[in-house]
Amino acid sequence: MQLMEGEKEEILTCVKEVLGENSKTHENLVPILQQVQKRLGYLPALAMDEIAAGLKVPAVDIYGLATFYNQFRLNPPGKHEVKVCMGTACYMTGGDITMESFERRMDINEGETSPDRHYSLERVACVGCCTLAPVAVIDDKVEGKVTPTRVDGIMLTLEEGREETGINEEESGPEEGDGNG
Ligand code: FES
């Protein structure tokens, strides 16, 4: 996931502060990851690399831990967060089709965030509205009977006000240096 303007500095500052507030031991790894995620809203790869360097542990260990625990989110939350219920009632009434419809319309897969961070898409367990199955939660608002046609309507609403972000998708080269030299 490409970083937005100023995000690199924000991540580096955050990790530095969190590492400064905790003893840099392997036992503190999970609390450190939790604190960084709490501040940034997710665990960027850069943050995990910095934490690995700070704790002198292989980065692959950090990635392994972060992917093992589903409390950690590796993609940034989108401006619009869409959660598709995959509880039994929703699954039995086509929750997987609802998910596929969102994936197609957003052009991302479950668990991902769109490159401009307008959307993020994830699955959730039963949200307690089974009589409305299949259910999706759109920015904390529960939507029921979310058929593919309903997905189209929801997407139209979410597309409104879509703005340019600080990400320039045409530039895919390496990040600029900090100008020191
Ligand atoms: S299974 Fe989806 S709301 Fe209960």
Image: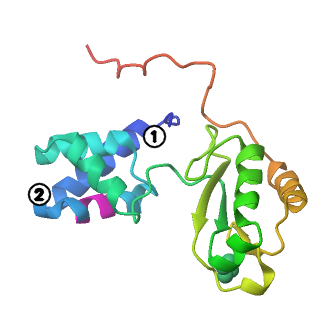
**Which residue is under mark 2?**
26
Residue found at x 21% / y 47%: 61
Whether residue 19 is visible here, answered yes or no, is yes
Residue 131 on image: x %, y %: 78, 86
Location of residue 29 with respect to 140 vertically, above or below? above
What type is the residue that disc 1 sits on? Glu
Considering the whole magenta stretch, tell me its main secondary structure: helix
Q: CA distance from mark 1 to mark 2?
A: 26 Å
Of the 4 image quadrants, the one containing the C terminus is top left
Residue found at x 25% / y 49%: 62
- From the viewer's side, name the closer residue of 113 and 147: 147
Start and end of the magenta stretch?
Answer: 31-36
Residue found at x 90% / y 58%: 149
Is residue 33 one of those drawn in magenta? yes
Q: Quadrant of residue 50?
A: top left
Residue 105 on image: x %, y %: 78, 45
Label total for image: 2
**Which residue is under mark 1?**
7
- From the viewer's side, name the closer residue of 6 and 101: 101
Whether residue 48 sits left or right of residue 126 in the image: it is: left
Mark 1 closeness class: few <14, some 14–19, many ≥20 residues within 10 Å: few
What type is the residue that disc 2 sits on? His
Residue 86 on image: x %, y %: 63, 69
Whether residue 57 sits left or right of residue 127 in the image: it is: left
Q: Could you say whether the residue bearing mark 1 is in a helix, strand or loop?
A: helix
Is residue 164 one of those drawn in magenta? no
Mark 2 closeness class: few <14, some 14–19, many ≥20 residues within 10 Å: few
Residue 145 on image: x %, y %: 84, 73
